[in-house]
Every structure is written in structure tokens, then in C-alpha cells.
Image (spheres, rainbow, N blue to C red):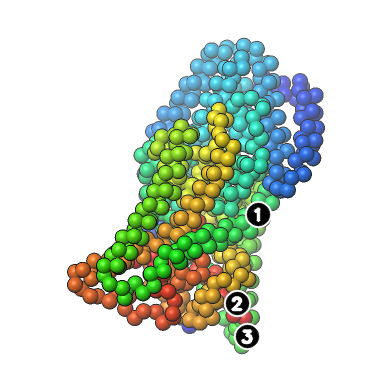
Amino acid sequence: MPHAGLCPCWGGRVLPLLLAYVCYLLLGATIFQLLEKQAEAQSRDQFQFEKLRFLENYTCLDQQALEQFVQVIMEAWVKGVNPKGNSTNPSNWDFGSSFFFAGTVVTTIGYGNLAPSTEAGQVFCVFYALVGIPLNVVFLNHLGTGLRAHLTALERWEDQPRRSQLLQTLGLALFLALGTMLILIFPPMVFSHVEGWSFGEGFYFAFITLSTIGFGDYVVGTDPSKHYISVYRTLAAIWILMGLAWLALVLPLGPLLLHRCSQLWLLSRGLGLKEGGAPETDGLPRPQKIPISA
Amino acid sequence: MALGSSLPASPASCRQRAREAPEGGGRGCAVPGTLLLLLSPVAHDSSRRFWRDKWTLLQNFTCLDGPALDSLIRGIVEAYQNGDIVLGNTTSMGRWEIVGSFFFSVSTITTIGYGNLSPRTMAARLFCISFALVGIPLNLVVLNRLGHLMQQGVHRCSRRPHVHPQDPAKARWLAGSITLLSGLLLFLLLPPLLFAHVEGWSYLEGFYFAFITLSTVGFGDYVIGMDPSRNYPLWYKNTVSLWILFGMAWLALIIKLMLSLLEAPRGSYSCYRHSSKGNFKAQSWRQSPDGETEPHSTQPGCCPEGPIIMQHPEPSTQVSGCGKES
């Protein structure tokens, strides 16, 4: 309230930012186009070729019937019916899958390999998400802050001798590295082994999932020709939650670590520069004051 | 022609059976508690329809055998997954033209991730990862700024002279509810009308699409501009992307509000109360002008912040703060 005069300055800040944003998007669009267009044309040609060959082999089929059939299959696929295999495929909405779906909603991953198609389902999904998304954020935060509070109980960090400062920083870094290994590197390897993906694909899947983008081009446990153990999807859901909580923990910690390292470095150079000069007035725990942008 | 014309004639009895069966199944399904299972009869229904079509095709074209058909289906599904919309002519949104590519980048860095397009080559995937790593924070910052702007506009309106200044709490409540309602109208209730008009969806489908988009869930079962048989007006896609940008800022604000409602009664975060009581406001205003501080910095680690999942423009904390103080 007291700074009504700031508004023009805000407007001045927002415009360049928006400009940069749009430029970034355009840049991305151009590069994606460069990278993908040729591959797309290739696979499109190949599909057309295969279709023609199929028509040649089965002469009783005509072009139009085939096109219509293609449309039918696509609609079935979009609706979540797996057209491969036979009609005894397990339902898409058995309990495990339904649970997985609920998970993808509240985490806002939204793979989209399953999506409600009835009106009732869609309306319910909206309200479910409206409550579920904040709930999920709260839950992840509890996990994250609980762990972080434990970790950064290095309250009077500045007062301790340099050696133990160094040790603690090293320990923190080691912990972060190990945890990242365990949660972000190891599971994608398991997934790529079970699903038959390459490691690159597994890593891509993990990134797209944990960043909650969720394209849905790779989803675990959807190949009908594979036999998964029954808890596979549940385990995957747990991994997702763990990974998200881990990110919630680590992302704020990273800058802290960076800050401490830089301080150590400065100290060792003999520049006893008091960096966080004029520490904030309220008595809040110090380490968490450091803004992300450190 | 063959498939389409034969459908209504021959499998009438089959269809009747198909219509009866899901009802029986539905009654069985309704027993377990998960409301999500409510969706399963329809999945059954469309699955049944698909099998019926498949069998009709096999009957009508006798030279086809089962395995051949299956291999055809596999080919089609793979092509579909590859992002080729396999029906000859598609709109520019569904291809790696500049429009579709732009749309893809938007859906990536907002973490909507419709998935109607996704990179297939390894190089593009790697680029996608690094692009998202930079883009998602950038998007958060932009949303933050927009949220601030929106909030400030509302505040300025509520401080007009004819609104009684002697009751600041009331004025703030008013501002909060105005943000809520006008946003609801502008971003969630009116756009479905546009979608219903341009895309031919029902109002409810449009609403569902709007919500799934703005909450960044992004299933991709409904995506705008994907129907090749329609021609879209030129301003349509631009308007929609603007709507996504502003609407996300607004919905993030709402979700943040829900978050504070969920958090408040527990009272386990003593520092949250402390900060909202004490110098919280002053601090947030002091810090906000310098550009690069993230919203995290205003609430020093006490009040839970979303991880990377939710965009949380800061102003919503002020909305919740207002509610507390009054």
C-alpha cells in the first residue's frame, strides 16, 4: 500500500520481461521446428507408404474404408481404448489405474493417456483438482520442509570454526548428490530396463514427469504386451511423489549451498566480506533467508 | 463408404447388447468408493464400439485376416504416437510448423504439456530438457509479475475516493472478492463460450478444457485448433495464448488461496502467523521492487512454498494476509 508510486516502475519492468519471454518462446519454437520437422516428414512418409503397401496387399480394401478405419482407431485411442491385442484387455479404469490417474491430476502432471470422457467425470475431475492440487502442494511442502529443517539445523553457521563449516558444507553436498542419485538417476534406469526404453528415453521420461510437464508420450505401465508386477504402477506413483518432494527440498537448498560455497571461497581468499550485511530484522532462521537468485 | 454405410445396418443387435451391458456393469462398478470408477462404464462403451467396428470391417472385407488387421492397427497407433495425425490434412497446430512449434514451447514451459506434439529425435529431447530448465523459472517470474500487476490494479480500484477509506479491512475483502469473481468470470466462465462457438464443444467441455489448461494439468484430450475440418479465425490462437498467460496467473492465485486455507487451521507454522502479523507486508513490499527476488524470499522458509509444481504469484499471499488481519 505505501508504495503507490511504484506502479509505473512495475509497468516498466513487466514489458521487457514479457518481451524476453516471447522472444524465448519464439527461439524455442524455431529450434524445435528445425530439429523435428525433418523427422516428422520422414515418419509421415513412411506411414503413408505402409498404408499404400497394405492397400496393395489386401486388394479388397479401398482407400476410403481404410481412412475411416484409421479414424475409428484414432478415436478409440484418444478415448483410452487400447486397440492392440484382444478385447479381454484389462479395463483402463480398474482401481490401480484410477489411482494413478488421480495422482497425475493432483500433481498436475496430466499425462493424458487416461482422461475422463463422461460429463460427470469431467466435472468431478475439475473439483477434485481444485482441492487436490493445493493439498498435494501442502503435502509435498511438509515432506520438504521437515527434511530441510532437519538438514539446516546448522543454525549458527557463521560462528563455527572454518573446518567444521567446510565439513558441513561437504556433507550437505554429499547428501544432496547421493539423494539425487537415488531418486533421480536410479529409478529411470529401472524404468528403462522394465519398459525396454533406452536410458536416454528413461531420463527424458523422468524429467518430463518430475517437471510436471507430462506430455504422455512415455508413460510407465501402459504396454499391453508386457506383464508388469501388480504393484508396479503404485511403485511408480510413489516414486513420483518422492521425486517431487525431493525437488521441493533440493531446489531451495541449492542456492543456499551456492551461497555458502561462495562465502567459504571468499573467506579463504582473505576477503572477510560480510555478505549478508545488515541481517534481517526479524529473528527467523538465517539460512533460509537467502533468495533463490543467489 | 463401406465401413460407414454398413455400420447402421448389420450390427443393430450387437449395438443393443452393447448398450445394455454397460448398465449392468455400471451397477457393479458403483459399489466401490472411488468416484473415479464412475468413468469406467463409458470406457467400456467406447471399447465395445471399437470392437464392433473392427469385426464389421473383418466381415465386410473378407480378404483381411486378424493378424494383418492387428499389424495395421499397431502401425496406425505408432504413427499416431509419433505425432503424425494420420488423417491426410491436419491443421498447423498439429505439426512442427512455426505455429505448432510455438504452441509446443508454450505448453512446455508452462508445464501444461498437452502432448499433442512431443519431440521424437534425441537431439530435440535434449534441447527440450534444457529449454524447460530455463523456461519454467522464466515463466514463473513472468506469471509473478502479471499477478502483481493484476493485484495492483484491483488495489488501485478499491482505493478510489468513493470507496470508504475508513474501513481498510472491508476494502481489502472487497478487493479480494472482486479479484476472485472477475477472474472467475473472465478466465473460467466466459472463455468456454468462445470455445463452444469456435471448436463446437459443449459449454461443459469448454469449461473442462479451460480448467485443465489453466491448472497446468493438461491431459491433451481437448486441445484447441486441432480440428482440420474447421477454419479458425486468425486472432483465435493469439487470444487463447494470452488467455492462458493471464488465466494461469489468476488461477495460481486462487490455488494459493486454497493453499492458505488448507494451511491456516493447522497453525503448525508459527512463523507464518508471525510474518503476516509483523513486518510481513513491509518486507514484501520492500523486496518486491528489486527484480530478481523470487516469491520464496518474502516468506523466509516458514510458510510452505510450492515446489516447482505450482506457479505462485506473490500477491495471493497478500490476499490471504488480508483475510487474516481483518
- Determine if marks 1 and 3 fall on one subunit: no
* Mark with earlier residue (3, 2): 3
x then y, percent, for residue A71? 61, 29
Q: Which residue is mark 2?
A: B324
Q: Residue A217 shows which numbered tag?
A: none
Q: Residue at x 52, y 21 (%)?
A: A51
- Determine if marks 3 and 2 fall on one subunit: yes
Q: Is residue B213 above or below residue B276?
A: above
Contact (Cβ within 8 Å) of mark 3 with mark 2: no
x then y, percent, for residue B143? 48, 62
Q: Residue at x 62, y 11 (%)?
A: B63
In the image, B238: left or right of A82?
left
In the image, B25: left or right of B300?
right
Q: Residue at x 36, y 39 (%)?
A: B123
- Looking at the rendered structure, the kind of residue marked 3 is Asp
Q: Which residue is mark 1?
A: A128
Q: Can residue B162 be seen at all in this image of the molecule?
A: no
Classify 10 Å Cα crowding around label 2: few (below 14), some (14-19), many (20 and above): few
x then y, percent, for residue A83? 61, 28
Disc 3 element: loop
The quadrant in which residue B3 appears is top right
Contact (Cβ within 8 Å) of mark 2 with mark 1: no
The chain to which mark 1 is attached is A
The chain to which mark 2 is attached is B
Q: Which residue is mark 3?
A: B167
Q: How many marks?
A: 3
Q: Is residue B308 above or below residue A57?
A: below
The chain to which mark 3 is attached is B
